[in-house]
Amino acid sequence: MIYTAALAGNPNSGKTTLFNLLTGSDQHVGNWSGVTVEKKEGSFHIGQDEIRLVDLPGIYSLSPHTMEEIIARDFLCKEKPDMIINIADGTNLERSLFLTLQLAELEIPMLLAINMWDELKKSGTETDCDGLARELGIKIVPISAKKGIGTDDLLRAVADLCKNGHAGSCGMYADLPVYDRIERIIRGNTARLRRHYVSRILSGDEKCFSELKLTPEQQCQIKEAVNDFCGGPGDSQTALADARYKYIQGLIRIYTVSKHSDSFTCAVDGIVTNKYLALPIFILIILGAFLIIFGRPGNALRDMLSAFIHTHIAAGAEAALQSAGAPDWCVSLVSDGIIGGVGAVVCFLPQIMLLFFFLTLLEDSGYMARAAFITDGLMSRIGLSGKAFIPMLMGFGCSVPAVMAARTADSQTEKQLTVMLIPFMSCSARMPIYALFAGALFPSRQGPVIFSLYLLGIVAAALSGLLLKKTVFRQSNPSFLLELPPYRIPEVKGLVRHLWYKCRDFLLRAGTLIFGMSIIIWVLQSFTPSLAPAGTPQDSLLGAIGRFLAPVFAPLGFGFWQASVSLLAGLVAKESVVAALTVLCGGSGGEALTAALPWLFTPASAYSFMTFALLYTPCIAAIGAIKQELGSWRRTAASVLFQTLVAYLIAFAVFRIASLF
Ligand code: GDP
Ligand code: MG
C-alpha cells in the first residue's frame, strides 16, 4: 500500500531534519503549484508499505494570514493525506501545541513527534508524553531528529497509524460550549470538519459562510453564538486564541516539570509589565539609553573621533600628498571628497556601537520582548506589532541602525513596513537643518517650530502606516505570537561578538557605498558641465542639476537652485543640507547664512522646506541599510519613491496652508 503523510509544524521545529532522516536522499524538491514556496517530497518504506512524505511549509496556525498557512491548509483539506506527522519543538511546546490543536480538528489521523528531546534532557525538563497523549487523544513520540533518537518508535507509530488510524480529540471543547452550539447550527450543511469550521468562524473567516451555504437565518444564529462567546460584539479571534492558550498552559503545567524555577522572572515581570508601572519604566529605560547615546557621552565620543579624523587623518593625508607633489585636485579629492565624506559618516560609529550595545543588552536580558508586549496595542493600529516600536524609536537617533534593528520583526511584511516608516522619524542629522531655519526665520518661536517638525514626522509615519496597511500590506498579520522569555544575564562573549559584527557591517558600508558616493558628489561639485574646474558652485555640474530640478520644487515655495542643490547634497547625509547652503550662499556660515536665508525664503517656504527635508528620501547610508534589509533594489526604490512622494505632498499642503496666514 502507498500512504501519504504530511509533515507539519512550526518553523524551526526540525521538519527538514526529520524529513531528511526519514527519506534519506530520496527526495524531490519543487514549488507548490503557482507559488515559490519550496515543496519537498520523498518516500520511505515500512515493511511492504510505502509512505510518501510531504514537507509542509512551517506554520504557527491554520488561519489563512500568510501564504504558508494557506498552502498548508489547502493541502491538508483538499488533498486529504492519510496522516499528519505533527512535529513539535519540545523546548517550545506551548507554541507548538497551538498548532497541534488546530491540526487535530482536521479529522486526519495524526501523531505528534516531540522533537529536540536531547535538549529537553539536557535542560532537565521532563515531559509526561503518555499523560499528554491521553489528554490530547493522539499518539505522542519523543524524538531527536538531529541525534536520531526515537526514530524506531516513530516508525512503529506511523505503521500503526496506517493500519488503524484515528483522529484525535482533546478535552478543550468541553469548556467551550460555543463549539457544540455552532456545530448544531451547521449540522445539516456538512457531515465533516464541523469543529474546523467552527474554529474558522470564530477566527472571523467569513468565507466559510458561503462554503457551507448557510442561510441568512443560520448566519444570524451563528453571529449571536459568537457574540455570546466573547461577551458582546468583540474579537472572537482573540478570545479563541486565549482559550486555546489557557488550555495548553494548563496541560504544560500538569504534564511537564522544568527543573529551573523562574520565580525571579515572575517577580520582575510583576513589576515591569504591571498595568500602571509598565509604561513609565519603559520610558525611563529608553530615555536613559537615549541620553547616553545622543546626549553628552555619545556626542563627546563622536566629537573625539571627528576631531581625530580631521586633524590627524585628513590633515596628515593632505600634507603627505602635497609633499609628494600631488596635483591640487588630487589633494582635494582625497581630503575633502573621500576623507570628508566617509569621515562624516564614520564619526557616528561610537553612537551606533552604543545604540547596539543597549539594544543587545535589552534583547539578551529578555526585556525587549516585554517592551514589544507593552507597546503592542499602540502599534497594531498602524499595522505593526510591538516589536517594531524599538526600531521606530531608534529612528530618532539614526535611521541606519534603526533599519538594521527592524530585522527582529516576525514577518517579512512587518519588516518591510517598519523599514519604510522608519525614515519619517526625524533623525539627529536633521536637527541642524531645523536649528538653522528656525533661527533665521522664526527667531522668537524656535522651540515650538522644531518640536512641531518632530511631531509631523510621527504623524506622517502613522498616516503612511495606515495607508500602506489598507493597500499594499493588507495581508500583514498584526496578531503576533509573543513569548516572554525568562530574564537572563547577557553573555559578555555574545555581546562583544554581536557588536563586532555590527561594527564591521557599518564600516563595510562606509568603505563601499559612502566612499563611492562621496567621490561622485565631489566630482559634481568640482567640475562644470564641460568638465573644466568649476570656479563657483553655481557653475558646477551640481549647480546645473540644481537649476534643472528647481522648477519641480516651485509649487512647494522653494523653486531656486540653491534649495534643490542642498537637498541633493542631503542625500549623502542630511547634515550636508546645511553645509551645502553655507557654500552656496557664499558666506562663511553662521551669522552670514542666518542673514542670507530670509532673502531666499519666506516663513511659509522655510517651513515647507524643513518639512520636505524631514520627510524626503533618507540619506545614502540609510538607503544602503534599507536595501540590505529589503533585499532588492526594486523594493528599495519603491520605498524611497514612496517617502519622497509623501514628503512632496505634505510639504505642498504645508506651504499652501502656511501661505494663507
Ligand atoms: P524546519 O524549519 O522545521 O525545517 O527545521 P530544521 O530541520 O531546519 O531545524 C531547525 C534547527 O533545529 C536546525 O538547526 C537543526 O539542526 C535543529 N534541530 C533539529 N532537530 C533537532 C534535535 O532533535 N535536537 C537539536 N538539538 N536540534 C535539532
Ligand atoms: Mg525546513
Image (cartoon, grey):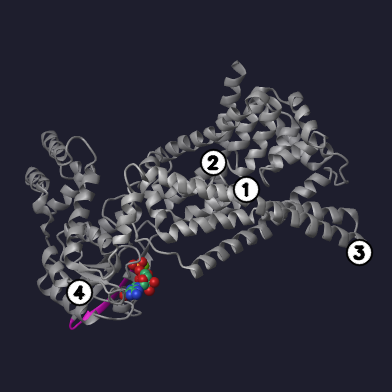
Q: Nearer the observer, disc 1 or disc 4? A: 1
**What's the distance in space between the residues labelled 2 and 1, CA to CA?**
21 Å
Q: Nearer the observer, disc 2 or disc 1? A: 1
Q: Where is mark 4, residue-wise?
A: 141
Indicate the secondary structure of the residue bearing disc 1.
Answer: helix
Determine contact: label 2, label 1, CB under 8 Å: no
The correct choice, above or below, for 595 with respect to 620 in the image is above
Looking at the image, tell me whether mark 2 or mark 4 is earlier in sequence order. 4
Q: Nearer the observer, disc 3 or disc 1? A: 1
Q: Where is mark 1, residue-wise?
A: 296
Location of residue 297 in the rendering, given as x and y in whole percent from the top left corner: 62, 51
Looking at the figure, which quarter contains the C terminus?
top right
Could you say which is closer to the camera, residue 25 or residue 268? Answer: 268
Looking at the image, tell me whether mark 3 or mark 1 is earlier in sequence order. 1
**What's the distance in space between the residues labelled 3 and 2, CA to CA?**
46 Å
Which residue of the protein is positioned furthest toward the bottom in this rendering?
A: 47
Looking at the image, tell me whether mark 3 or mark 2 is earlier in sequence order. 3
Q: Quadrant of residue 219?
A: top left
Q: Where residue 324 is drawn, which disc sits there?
A: 3
Q: How many marks?
A: 4
**What's the distance in space between the residues labelled 3 and 4, CA to CA?**
76 Å
Determine contact: label 3, label 2, CB under 8 Å: no
Q: Quadrant of residue 583?
A: top right
Residue 41 belongs to magenta span? yes
Could you say which is closer to the camera, residue 646 or residue 434? Answer: 434
Amino acid found under the numbered disc labelled 1:
Arg
Q: Where is mark 2, residue-wise?
A: 425
The span picked out in magenta is: 40-48
Give the dominant element type of the magenta stretch: helix, strand or loop.
Answer: strand
